[in-house]
Amino acid sequence: MTESESMVYRVVPKCACSSIGQIMYYSDHGAFFDGDIHDATRGLHKWAQEGSQAAITANVKGGQTFAFTCVRNPYTRILSSFFDKICGIQRNGRRYRGNLVPLLVQKYGIEVGSPEDNFDFDQIKSFRRFLLFARDTIRWRKPMDPDIHWSAMSGHISTYVVNGGRYHHIFWTEKFDEGMQVVLDRTKTPHKVDLKAIPRFNESEGHGPARAHPVEAYFDDLSMHLMYEIYKKDFTVFKYDFDNPANKMPVGEIDLAEVHAKLGE
């Protein structure tokens, strides 16, 4: 939430959250946060900061502030998680979550390459094995609990509804400028934001290998079956095309009443 309480955003990992956080920061302060917005401990209210929780709770319960979130095609989101979190070297110079990658190599036969070999490995084979691991974490919480970067968007978004919040707007990463402009048009901020002048803040870019194939190449029949098992609600509620991984664009309009009904259960 902005300190001015102009807007409340439910973060969904891998869905333009760095850009949205920086836009919110700018709308209050007239400048961007110097660094990764996820590391900011001032300038924004965050649930992880104890001092922010009372203000956020009161705001959500009151329902006065414009509340929104952003979603992304499940096929491209899980691929992004794989290339960034599993294959990539993180900002601290190490692998994500320490022993996670060695665990995947040992238990699932995944290869991830390294900067030394220019990330030379069979991306399709390794990704499909990672998808099996992601399903195992989500379905059975084994060999570990699901990570926020590949757990379902509907799960993240539902916590806000279950705790008494209502969304005023949900938009797609694939139509970012259009969706974010709605937020800015419907809120009063201390500083005006010109979206055309805002740089993109992709904090995960450049940490790992580039995707070598089109999206649809990574998903065979079994992979699509696993995707449906894990992300059925994401596809249906946020109107993405399950049948065609090559189509990243939504195929219908998001119905906020449906979102609140299905995710508030």
Image (cartoon, helix red, strand yellow):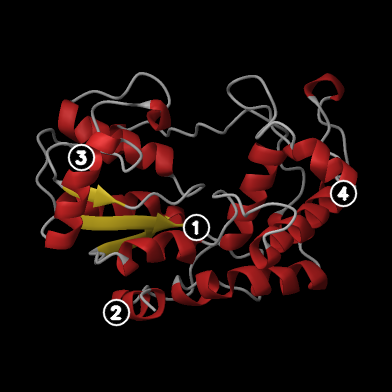
Query: Residue 89: percent from the left, percent from the top?
Result: 68, 27
- Mark 2 crowd level (few <14, some 14–19, many ≥20, 10 Å Cα): few
Query: Residue 213: percent from the left, percent from the top?
Result: 76, 49
The residue under label 2 is 257
| Circle nearer the N terminus (3, 1) | 3
Q: What's the amino acid at mark 1?
A: Arg
Q: CA distance from mark 4 to mark 2?
A: 42 Å
Query: Does residue 265 appear left or right of residue 227 in this picture?
Result: left
| Residue 122 vs residue 176, the one in the foreground | 122
The residue under label 1 is 72
The residue under label 3 is 2
Q: CA distance from mark 3 to mark 4?
A: 43 Å
Which is more foreground, mark 1 or mark 2?
A: 2
Q: What's the amino acid at mark 2?
A: Ala
Residue at the (15%, 53%) spot, across then down = 59
Q: What's the amino acid at mark 4?
A: Lys
| Circle nearer the N terminus (1, 4) | 1
Q: Secondary structure at mark 2?
A: helix
